[in-house]
């Protein structure tokens, strides 16, 4: 098998004086997500003498500024500050950012996220520069994280950040997800673009996150570029191969990706604590082997996987697949610091169990495969993208805007920031849509959007529910201080249009300023520009001298 340049990312240095490496962080006692599996995998890869055959790199930690390329500023700022002691206060009693019990505020959560995201971004940079054909970051693959909140054990979506880095160089990127759970966070991030195709093979039906039907195909320019392959319990190697190969082959033919990102979530293995598939180690790794043969730049990421010893076995074997030496390694495990964990057989294997394959038993697999292929046939050939030379650094970094010179803010900086937050809060409250406006806008919804909303309405009811990955049950979110996490998106009724990037602001050429159409009248005051309002100290109009004694202290809640 031909040689490939493989880059392998691993961070051996974790939280100072507390953790030895990335695998030493913990979500808490009894939590099924174990970052320690990354350390076990690394030691097993080392025991097989694979490190000498790869470029082993320590990833540069992702900064808060880098994370905001996808996530909101306030969410990243929250992760940077939160501790187990302050979580209750900073999450507004569990109603913002970390909702439910899936995502605890464990010690060192931001540093863990910076390592995970830094590895995936570094892998993308390595691929884009041509320094590697395949890049591996087993600490990545956290595909459930949303733009403004954590979900499904995932805090920062390293996959989205990595793909955004690839898009600086490559016109089209294919994302493939073989985790047992739907890759909802990545799909949602690229739901409206044709430059990224997402393809997820996952369990569907009363199962977290409750999304991923074949009717969810994208919106706008992205229509048809979200491919979902919903499966049932007990799928075996042969069944999975029968749907994976034809669907991915068709995608490669139609979409012609410049690079591929494969999320190798190991909870689709047989015997996983939270999974319900019946794949062996070989069936899971076949996906890596299949993509490697096509000689397209490839990034391998981790993901789910809650039976630690099986996760380590599989990711070790898939590392060997990336190197092309899977047929040369001994299935009898070499000694390593965790050798006793792999008893009683001490072999590099994950065997199937006696689960029934409901995909064959109920005859659903053929229908799913046919539907997926039919959707792909409807796509036009690969979209063209006009690319330009990409500078190594951003303009802001080149000019030094991102550099902290250690100087404190002056009084003007503080007041401007305070006024901007004040105006933002006023705009946010004014933009909360009423039920009448939502009903009015529903008349223009197309059939696919209406179907998606009907599905989502059944899943989350009034828009105040979440599904837990731990229990696969829906739960209500309490309202604190008059805030609902769904206020960002508005009220979700059965006919509400799915909105991603929508704003009431526009540029008015007549007055040469930004106008917010939703703020034509706020508490009786006419709309104003942000700069003019800040000049008045945050007031919304001429109050007849009431502001003469205003001292600039605005109470922030």
Image (tube, rainbow, N blue to C red):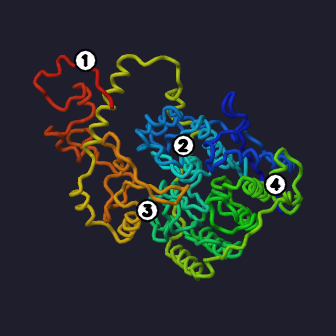
Report, in whole angstroms, how far the alpha carbon at label 3 lies from the one at label 4. 48 Å
Read off the residue under disc 3.
221
Does 442 sit left or right of 43 as displayed? left
Q: Residues within 10 Å of mark 3 (few under 14, many from 20)?
A: few
Write the residue at 63% across / 55% down.
304
Q: Nearer the viewer, mark 3 or mark 4?
A: 4
Read off the residue under disc 2.
104
Toward the left, the furthest residue is 544
Report, in whole angstroms, how far the alpha carbon at label 4 lies from the one at label 1. 67 Å
Write the residue at 71% across / 37% down.
21
Report, in whole angstroms, how far the alpha carbon at label 3 lies from the one at label 1. 49 Å
Of mark 3 and mark 2, the one earlier in the sequence is: 2
Which percent across, then down, holds residue 411?
36, 17
Report, in whole angstroms, how far the alpha carbon at label 3 lies from the one at label 2. 36 Å
The mark found on residue 551 in the picture is 1
Q: Nearer the viewer, mark 3 or mark 2?
A: 2
Which percent across, then down, holds residue 275?
63, 62
**Quadrant in the picture for the C terminus:** top left
Of mark 3 and mark 4, the one earlier in the sequence is: 3
Q: Secondary structure at mark 3?
A: helix
The mark found on residue 342 in the picture is 4
Q: Quadrant of residue 435?
A: bottom left
Which percent across, then down, holds residue 144?
53, 53
Does 491 sit left or right of 291 as displayed? left
Q: Residues within 10 Å of mark 2 (few under 14, many from 20)?
A: many
Report, in whole angstroms, how far the alpha carbon at label 1 lies from the one at label 2. 40 Å
Eyeballing the image, is 419 above or below 446?
above
Q: Are marks 1 and 2 in contact (CB under 8 Å)?
A: no
Q: Secondary structure at mark 4?
A: helix
Of mark 1 and mark 2, the one earlier in the sequence is: 2
């Amino acid at each position: 098998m031909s040689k490939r340049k493989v880059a392998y990312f691993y961070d051996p240095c974790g939280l100072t004086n507390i953790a030895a490496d990335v695998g030493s962080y913990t979500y808490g006692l009894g939590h099924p997500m174990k970052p320690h599996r990354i350390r076990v995998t690394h030691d097993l890869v080392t025991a097989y003498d694979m490190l000498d055959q790869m470029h082993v790199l320590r990833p540069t930690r992702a900064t808060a500024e880098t994370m905001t390329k996808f996530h909101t500023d306030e969410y990243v700022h929250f992760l940077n500050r939160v501790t187990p002691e302050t979580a209750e206060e900073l999450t507004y009693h569990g109603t913002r950012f970390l909702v439910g019990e899936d995502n605890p505020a464990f010690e060192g959560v931001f540093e863990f996220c910076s390592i995970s995201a830094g590895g995936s971004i570094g892998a993308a940079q390595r691929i884009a520069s041509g320094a590697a054909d395949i890049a591996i970051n087993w600490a990545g693959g956290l595909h459930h994280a949303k733009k403004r909140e954590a979900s499904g054990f995932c805090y920062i979506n390293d996959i989205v950040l990595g793909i955004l880095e690839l898009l600086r160089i490559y016109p089209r990127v294919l994302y493939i997800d073989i985790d047992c759970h739907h890759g909802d966070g990545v799909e949602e991030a690229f739901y409206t673009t044709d430059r990224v195709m997402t393809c997820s093979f996952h369990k569907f039906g009363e199962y977290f996150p409750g999304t991923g039907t074949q009717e969810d195909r994208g919106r706008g320019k992205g229509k048809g570029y979200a491919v979902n392959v919903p499966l049932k319990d007990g799928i075996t190697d042969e069944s999975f191969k029968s749907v994976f190969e034809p669907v991915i082959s068709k995608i490669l033919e139609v979409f012609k990706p410049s690079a591929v990102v494969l999320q190798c979530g190991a909870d689709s293995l047989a015997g996983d604590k939270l999974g319900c598939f019946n794949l062996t180690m070989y069936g899971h790794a076949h996906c890596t082997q299949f993509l490697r043969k096509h000689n397209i730049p490839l990034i391998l990421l981790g993901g789910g996987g809650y039976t630690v010893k099986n996760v380590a076995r599989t990711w070790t074997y898939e590392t060997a697949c990336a190197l092309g030496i899977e047929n040369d390694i001994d299935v009898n495990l070499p000694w390593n610091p965790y050798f006793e964990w792999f008893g009683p057989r001490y072999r590099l294997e994950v065997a199937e169990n006696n689960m029934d394959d409901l995909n064959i038993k109920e005859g659903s697999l053929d229908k799913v495969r046919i539907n997926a292929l039919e959707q792909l046939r409807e796509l036009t050939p690969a979209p063209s993208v006009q690319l330009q030379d990409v500078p190594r650094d951003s303009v802001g970094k080149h000019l030094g805007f991102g550099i902290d010179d250690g100087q404190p803010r002056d009084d003007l900086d503080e007041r401007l920031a305070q006024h901007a937050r004040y105006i933002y809060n006023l705009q946010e409250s004014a933009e909360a849509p009423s039920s009448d406006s939502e009903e009015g806008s529903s008349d223009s919804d197309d059939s696919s959007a209406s179907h998606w909303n009907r599905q989502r309405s059944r899943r989350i009811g009034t828009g105040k529910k979440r599904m837990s990955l731990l229990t696969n049950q829906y739960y209500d979110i309490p309202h604190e201080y008059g805030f609902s996490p769904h206020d960002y998106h508005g009220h979700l009724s059965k006919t509400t249009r799915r909105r991603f990037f929508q704003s009431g602001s526009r540029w008015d050429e007549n007055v040469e300023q930004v106008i917010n159409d939703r703020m034509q009248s706020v508490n009786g005051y006419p709309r104003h520009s942000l700069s003019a309002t800040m000049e008045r100290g945050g007031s919304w109009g001429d109050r007849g001298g009431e502001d003469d004694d205003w001292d600039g202290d605005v109470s922030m809640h």
